[in-house]
Image (cartoon, rainbow, N blue to C red):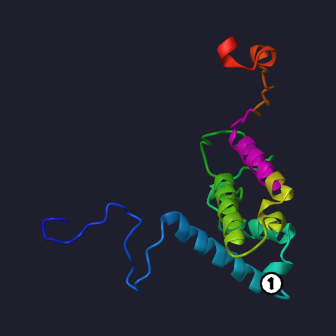
Amino acid sequence: MNSSGKTVSKNPTEGSSSNGRPSLSRYESQKRRDWNTFLQYLKNQNPPLSLPNCSYNHVLEFLRYLDQFGKTKVHLHGCPFFGQPDPPGQCTCPLRQAWGSLDALIGRLRAAYEEHGGPPEGNPFGNGAIRVYLREVKECQAKARGILFKKKKKKKKMINHEMIKNPNPELR
């Protein structure tokens, strides 16, 4: 209780909105907004698409469509600022969606698809082609800005020879 005698929730995601339903977290609100945007995109296709007819190709088209609303300058190969992290001037290179924004968007849409009854094995947002596209966008944007990402090498599992010889820890 606070000084005025009202009960105060300790959980900031608890509470309710003006319509009586619990208020959503920032993530849940964004996920709902993204899902509705994607469904609207499908409806606006000619002919309109239904979700069961949606494939990873439609998801890729959606991601490319979103580029027109991007705010990240991506320098082209012919640009004098290509590969410079802090370019000294302006150029006419296009604005695109940032890789991190697209990656987060796909994560939210992937979750929303399954929450709306889509089977995990048929989730177009989880298709390998989407991961390849996101990796290409990441690498392209990194090169355009002069940022190099080193690929992580897979570590070989070290087998504890002690465990193989004698699996009982009391006898070691």
Residue appearing at x 84%, y 67% in the figure: 122
Percent of width and height locating residue 112: 67, 70
Task: Return the residue found at the far top.
Answer: 172
The quadrant of the rendering that contains the N terminus is bottom left
> Would residue 144 be seen by someone viewing this image from the given angle?
yes
Whether residue 149 is in magenta: the answer is: yes
Q: Secondary structure at mark 1?
A: loop
Residue appearing at x 40%, y 84% in the figure: 20
Would you name the residue on which mark 1 appears?
Answer: 50
Within 10 Å of disc 1 (Cα), the crowding (few <14, some 14-19, many 20+) is few
Q: Nearer the viewer, residue 17 or 152?
A: 17
- Residue kind at label 1, given as amino acid type: Ser
Residue 35 left/right relative to 42: left
Q: Nearer the viewer, residue 81 or 16?
A: 16
The magenta stretch is: 133-150
The quadrant of the rendering that contains the C terminus is top right
Percent of width and height locating residue 38: 70, 75
Indicate the quadrant where residue 108 lies: bottom right
Q: Nearer the viewer, residue 132 or 162?
A: 162
Q: Is residue 77 above or below residue 30?
A: above
Dominant SS of magenta comes to: helix
Percent of width and height locating residue 14: 39, 68
